[in-house]
Image: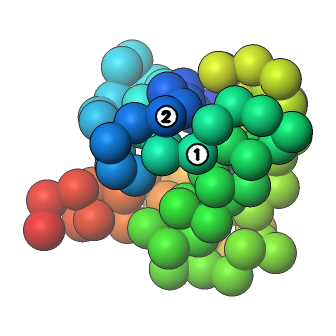
Amino acid sequence: MARLKVRVTPRGSKDEIIGWRDDVLAIKLTAPPVEGAANKACIEFLAKVLDVKRAQITLVSGEKSRDKTFEVKGLSDQETNQRLTTYRNR
């Protein structure tokens, strides 16, 4: 199981990976930070990027914060980083 630290910027022009800042992945999402919409959008975006099911991604901390921690079931930290790099470089 992988742990992924993410910094989310809501209300962006499109869903995209900005890049790494230390060990934190910066992501922009179009969803607003209202009633969990950005959390749901972040899980959906990460599932697409990592090519896993949404059910494999769990928000562990940061429900009401821009800084979030997710667990990704079925992938190691190395596999997660590799898939994120591959997605970003295409």
On residue 73, the disc is none
Q: Is residue 59 visible?
A: yes
When the figure is inspected, residue 54 is found, relative to residue 68, above or below; the finding is below
**Residue bearing the label numbered 1:** 31
When the figure is inspected, residue 22 is found, relative to residue 78, above or below; the finding is above
- Spot occupied by residue 45 in the image (x, y as percentages of width and height): 53, 62
**Residue bearing the label numbered 2:** 11
Instruction: Return the residue nearer the eye: 52 or 28.
Output: 28
In which quarter of the view is residue 68 placed? top right
Q: Residue at x 60, y 79 (%)?
A: 52
Which quadrant holds the C terminus?
Answer: bottom left
Instruction: Return the residue nearer the eye: 5 or 1.
Output: 5
- Spot occupied by residue 43 in the image (x, y as percentages of width and height): 67, 58
- Spot occupied by residue 22 in the image (x, y as percentages of width and height): 39, 18
- The residue carrying pointer 2 sits among few (fewer than 14), some (14 to 19) or many (20 or more) residues within 10 Å by Cα, namely some
Judged from the image, the secondary structure of the residue bearing numbered disc 2 is loop
Judged from the image, the secondary structure of the residue bearing numbered disc 1 is loop
Q: Residue at x 36, y 19 (%)?
A: 21
Residue type, label 1? Ala
The tag earlier along the polypeptide, 2 or 1, is 2
In this view, which residue lies farthest toward the left? Answer: 90
Q: Is residue 76 visible?
A: no
- The residue carrying pointer 1 sits among few (fewer than 14), some (14 to 19) or many (20 or more) residues within 10 Å by Cα, namely many
Asked if the residues shown at circle 2 and circle 1 are in contact, with their CB atoms under 8 angstroms apart, the answer is yes
Left or right, 5 with reference to 18: right
Q: Residue at x 34, y 30 (%)?
A: 20
